[in-house]
Amino acid sequence: MTQHDSARQDSARLAIIGCGAVVDHHILPSLRRIGWLPSVLVDRSPERIALAAGKLGGKGRTIAKASDWREVADQFDAAIVAVPHVLHGPIGLDLLASGKHLFMEKPLAVSTEQGGAMIAAAEAGGLSLRVGLLRRYLHVARWLKALLEARVLGEVKRFSIREGFVFNWATSSDALLRRDLAGGGVLMDTGAHTLDLMLWWLGDVASLTYRDDAGHGVEADCLLECRMASGATGRVELSRTRDLRDTILIEGTEGFAEVHLAKNLVLAGSPNALSFQHEGHSPAEMPMQLFPELFDGELRDFRASVAGDAAKGITGTEGLRSVGLIERCYAARETLEMPWQSARPSTGANGDVPKLPAGSTALITGATGFIGGRLAERLVEQGVRVRCLIRNFGQATRLARLPVEIVHGRLDDAEAVNRAAKGADYVFHCAYDLRARTLNLDGLERLIEAAQREKAKGFVYVSSFSVYEPFPDGVLTEETRDGDRSWIYARTKLDLEARVLKAAREEGLNASIVQPSIVYGPFSKPWTNAPAEMLLTGEVILPDLGEGLCNAVYIDDLVDGLVLAAQRPEAKGERFIMTGPEPVIWASFYEAIAEAVRANKPSYWPADAIAKNNHGFMHDLKMVLANPKRLIQIVVRWPTARQALQAGYDALPKPLYDLVTRVYFGGGGRRFGMRYLPDPQALALYRSQAHASSEKAVRLLGYRPRYDFTAGMRETAAYLDWAYGDLREQSAAPSLPQPDATTGSASANLAHAG
């Protein structure tokens, strides 16, 4: 019996090569469920191997562990490979050359040359080569395939695919953020699934145009427009920054159908499509199918293919089709211009946008956030070398578009801070960790020490004008008394400010403090995205007539101020409120966003009625009782809890297992018809008559806001239309199936599973 024949037994010895997030969260639990446990674990990280081994369980089992699979090549017959994309081809070819059956997490490879070589090697060796394209196991995907093959829709004329989510994958390394490891961004990652389905359903692409947002790094948003060999035309839009519909809409000469790309949902269709049945499934009776089941299906099929069933699994030849299309897209790449960029002013009042010297080096903390991210974009545009200290790789997808250096580490990690600050001319401290007050204080201490050692020319700490809350009526300046220290956020910010001022006034650091007001603009979570989502999904309540003052500042004006504060000698040891040219009332602010997303305007209640309906334990209890799934939504916002939930899914007690199955894995989307009442703190903010003044920044720094509210909302409205068009359509079409609100949809998990 040859080595290949011995591997074609149910007892084929299995290795896992690469023990990262997809293995931890999905593959290991699936292998436990189907009863095919690996005997070999391979990873360069001993910590990841130990974590994986610990989750396999089983006393007395021997698990071989290695940093290189060649060290244990004689101890396995088949391998599941889950390493960074660019390593798929080299590792896969070597494994096949050594006679190993191979399951490759998508994509098969990053080039058709490598993928083709793997296919040839598998055929020459009589080996199984399968690819992790698990969406083909969805009932709805097979239903649509049969619908098209039966020509129920007639001749397909056009189609539209829109798939996107705000990236939240608990990635264990920076591999997805680096072109040299990932081979690409959302097109290579999510697109490997999406384009595979498109080609499977609709056939080959004859011609295409392709645009994305990454001149450097890896793309977060992309757009593919193509003509198929059949003559049909279509658009594919993929995003890591927006929640899109996650559907394909196909129109033919005899009808149409719209189906979800990752869940068993037929959202709409012509009567002939909605009456079509396949394998006992009809659009109205499509059963729930959770993505853990899909992992089980593809891994069972791989095991069967190793045992000799050539009909099982997605073959390398099939997997190569999407690789070839991705390769064509990148070869034809053009720049994807964002809608809000066209109206952006190019100069300030004095003829120039504030700049740092080209060639200088800037360190930004909090660059995965809104303010730090836009600052990084601006500095890159100006020829500044930008280095970013980040804690969470999964939140850095927009940052990864830029030619910036990413240093991974926590603020209180002195070694990481020192690496990030090495050679920095300017330091912008935008980060704030909501989890721990001491982490913020210790982190600032480490940054100040590093900036002093590097003799930084400028150090800017980004605080908030919230340090004065609750605001007194009238003009609000840097001399206004401190706010309520019982609020942990304000107390921590004030203590951080005090430490910066001490470093500037007593220790010689060229440090200053910027206190932004209400910062809005593209990608602002609290003051653009959140209001838009609330207006689109329910009723927003504002107090009285909404006549409280909103001290709004457009993001680019704030970035101007940060750059000025970093350079002007007058900034040292001072703090500066930075806001827009004039405040607007909150009614105008919310109504402008409502107009941009074409939603209902806010409702206005007397303040005492709001306070009565939104206060105390009973209100909180009513919220939970109205939507008990909210509890899981809150829990899994914490990355550690989310990882534990995903990884420990199978070990949950039966009642909790069933709840998580329905809510976390089977849910998705948003809950419509909500009523959003401001809590007591927000109520005070919305009623405030404080007029924030930037007079000090104008006088000492030359700060000149370029955007009044009309100009700022012009760009913001263009962003909102781009970001929330799909949600607007959903809110306007309540008759379509609307899943319950959860932390993240199944599509978000499936989009990058593997």
Image (cartoon, rainbow, N blue to C red):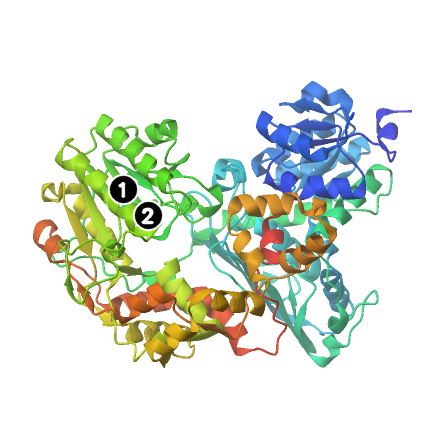
Viewport quadrant of the N terminus: top right
Q: Quadrant of residue 306?
A: top right
Residue 524 x, y percent position in the rendering: 36, 58
Q: Is residue 661 left or right of residue 348?
A: right
Q: Is residue 602 visible?
A: no
Against 133, residue 555 (above or below) is below
Against 182, residue 236 (above or below) is below
* Along the line of sight, the residue nearer the viewer: 191 or 686: 686
Q: Is residue 100 visible?
A: yes
Residue 12 x, y percent position in the rendering: 83, 31
Q: Residue furthest top?
A: 71
- Residue visible at 74% across and 71% down? 283
Q: Residue furthest left?
A: 699
Against 677, residue 457 (above or below) is above
What amino acid does circle 1 point to? Phe
Q: Which residue is mark 2?
A: 372
Please report whichever mark, 1 or 2, sits nearer to the chain's N-terminal start: 2
- Residue visible at 69% across and 49% down? 133
Q: Quadrant of residue 591?
A: bottom left
Q: Which residue is mark 1?
A: 428
Q: Quadrant of residue 483?
A: bottom left
Residue 592 x, y percent position in the rendering: 33, 74
Q: Residues within 10 Å of mark 1 (few under 14, many from 20)?
A: many
* Along the line of sight, the residue nearer the viewer: 8 or 747: 747
Q: Residues within 10 Å of mark 2 (few under 14, many from 20)?
A: many
Q: Residue furthest front?
A: 617
What amino acid does circle 2 point to? Gly
Disc 1 to disc 2, how far (Cα)? 8 Å
Give the number of the disc on residue 669: none
